[in-house]
Image: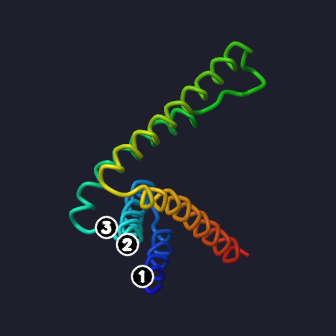
């Protein structure tokens, strides 16, 4: 519990950064927090961590590329043709299929390193970590809004 509190304090410190370097710094800081959180919660020893992190980092990198494709700037939706919209839908389906294949590969690769139960725990931890980030972000925005008033 004490370690979790320390991690939450680190989250709050994360949001205090400013400047244009902030986006890159945020990503790096989030990655550090995630690494610490997963290592602790999965009880990864040094040997297992050395095998786990390259596999997981490759997955995350590939997933990030998919998300960039999925969230590219959309044109004004009232101005796109039906054919363009159809193309976009096909791209979304392709991205979803690739997402599935990535997850399938991750699970297969992780089964060489850890048990199925640990992989399920990792999946749960990903959700928990994401929720904590969202909660911290909202809390930060609320504090900023209160300070402006």
In the displayed image of the protein, which residue is found farthest to the right?
A: 78
**Residue 12, percent from left and from top:** 50, 75
Asked where in the image residue 135 lies, by quadrant, the reply is bottom right
| Number of residues whose C-alpha sits closer than 10 Å to that of mark 1, classed few (under 14), some (14–19) or many (20 or more) | few
Q: Secondary structure at mark 2?
A: helix
Measure the C-alpha gap from mark 2 to mark 1. Answer: 9 Å
In the displayed image of the protein, which residue is found farthest to the top?
A: 83
Query: Mark 3 highlights which residue?
Result: 44
Q: Which mark is residue 40?
A: 2
In the drawing, does residue 46 fall left or right of residue 26? left
Whether tag 3 and tag 1 are in contact, CB under 8 A, the answer is: no
| Number of residues whose C-alpha sits closer than 10 Å to that of mark 2, classed few (under 14), some (14–19) or many (20 or more) | few
Q: Which mark is residue 74?
A: none
Q: Quadrant of the C terminus?
A: bottom right
Q: Which tag is nearer the camera, tag 2 or tag 1?
A: 2
Q: Which mark is residue 3?
A: 1
**Residue 27, percent from left and from top:** 42, 56
Q: Is residue 101 above or below residue 133?
A: above
- From the viewer's side, name the closer residue of 138 and 64: 64
Whether tag 2 and tag 1 are in contact, CB under 8 A, the answer is: yes
């Amino acid at each position: 519990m004490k370690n979790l509190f320390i991690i939450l304090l680190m989250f709050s410190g994360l949001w205090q950064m400013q400047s244009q370097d902030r986006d890159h710094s945020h990503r790096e800081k989030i990655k550090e927090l995630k690494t610490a959180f997963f290592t602790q919660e999965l009880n990864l020893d040094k040997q297992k961590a050395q095998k786990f992190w390259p596999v997981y980092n490759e997955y995350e990198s590939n997933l990030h590329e998919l998300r960039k494709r999925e969230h590219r700037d959309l044109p004004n939706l009232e101005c796109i043709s039906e054919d363009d919209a159809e193309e976009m839908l096909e791209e979304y389906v392709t991205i979803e299929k690739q997402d599935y294949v990535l997850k399938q590969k991750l699970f297969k690769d992780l089964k060489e390193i850890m048990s199925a139960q640990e992989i399920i725990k990792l999946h749960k931890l990903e959700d928990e970590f994401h929720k904590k980030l969202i909660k911290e972000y909202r809390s930060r925005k609320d504090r900023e809004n209160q300070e402006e008033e």
